[in-house]
Image (cartoon, helix red, strand yellow):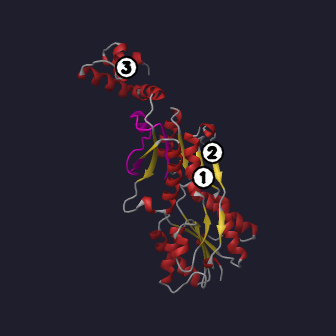
Amino acid sequence: MSRKDVAKLAGVSEATVSRVMNNVGPIKKETREKVLQAAEQLGYELNALAQQLARQKSGNLGVVLPHVPKVHLFSTYYFSEILSGIAEIARKSNVDLLMVFQDPTQRRDYTKLFRSKKIDSCIILGSNDNEEERAALQELSDHDFPFVIINQRFPESSFRFVDGDHEYGSYLAVSHLLDQGSRKVALLNGPKQYSNSIDRYKGYIKALEEHSIAIQDQWLVEGNYSRKSGMAAAEKLASLIKTGAIDSIFAANDRMAIGAMEGLSAYELEAGKHYRIIGYDNSDGANIVTPKLSSVAVPFYDMGVTAASFLLNEAQQAEQYAILPVTLVVRQSSIL
């Protein structure tokens, strides 16, 4: 839609539309409201403000975070490490961070942050693959708003992302369990709308296939990456361990692994004695639990640094994606 279309619908001149959209000169309140209403109806406002943003800067880097009730995001290892990395590059670039909490029950409209001139670029955490999310990200891309997604990939789209090599990390973890003598490995995974859950599954399958082990449906258990979901899975896992259906567990993150260990202890099952277990993330908690938890170390801080550099470092602005290496840290929980 053009400025002429807006002017026709609002019953004003094109010059008046231009003054309203660029906030120039005195305009009657009722005239301004008519123009803005017409622009919104025709979808013109977004384009006009996008053009303004090309000329004006807020000085802010936006970081979109999921709003999770009763979860202290800044105290969790995953978010605190990534945010620390982002903040370091923002500090060096003399840019401020604007934290934006996305309510999962509300309609996603990332472009609003740009249209309202709150941010110049954006890093998105907690993204997952669903129709609404794809549409919101595509809208950002269509209007050339600069953004990077961390720890989530959309293989059929060209969205910029920074991720860890989770398929290889999963492969390392399961291969270690099999090398230790395990032959019946359960996968305590996260929801499949997250690309890293799919990656973990792929690495898990690859390791089993290399050892000529056929997967069994009962070995697949799903949580939601919370400690509580790990504890909830303990009842099923305990039954599988006691009947000999599984002899080890690979958990898709440390929080679920620790929750499962805590839940299994209620059934008098101890990691490193009655079963082997490996987590993922190598969080601080992996070193605190007893026995200490083997885990795949993910460079979350470096992921934050890389994502922010894509947006703020001129030499890296042309880069489209990065997949950072992960490593396996072996501790007591995976060795009987």
Q: Nearer the viewer, residue 306 or 1?
A: 306
Which residue was labeled with disc 3? 6
Q: Position of residue 220 (x, y in %)?
A: 58, 69
Label 2 Cα neighbours within 10 Å, binned few <14 / some 14-19 / many ≥20: some
Q: Is residue 100 magenta?
A: yes
Q: Amino acid at mark 2?
A: Tyr
**Marks 3, 2: nearer the viewer:** 2
The quarter of the picture where the N terminus appears is top left
Q: Answer yes or no: is residue 235 visible.
A: no
Q: Amino acid at mark 3?
A: Val
Which residue was labeled with disc 1? 163
Give whichever of discs 1 and 2 has the lower sequence position.
Answer: 1
Give whichever of discs 1 and 3 has the lower sequence position.
Answer: 3
Asked whether the residues under the numbered discs 1 and 2 touch, taking CB atoms below 8 Å apart as contact, a structural biologist would say yes
Q: Which mark is residue 229?
A: none
Label 3 Cα neighbours within 10 Å, binned few <14 / some 14-19 / many ≥20: many
Q: Residue at x 57, y 85 (%)?
A: 242
**Residue 205 left/right relative to 94:** right
Q: Residue at x 29, y 22 (%)?
A: 32
Q: Residue furthest bottom?
A: 268
Q: Amino acid at mark 1?
A: Asp
Q: Is residue 96 magenta?
A: no
Q: Secondary structure at mark 2?
A: strand
Label 1 Cα neighbours within 10 Å, binned few <14 / some 14-19 / many ≥20: many
Q: Which mark is residue 321?
A: 2
Question: Magenta segment, which residues?
Answer: 99-126
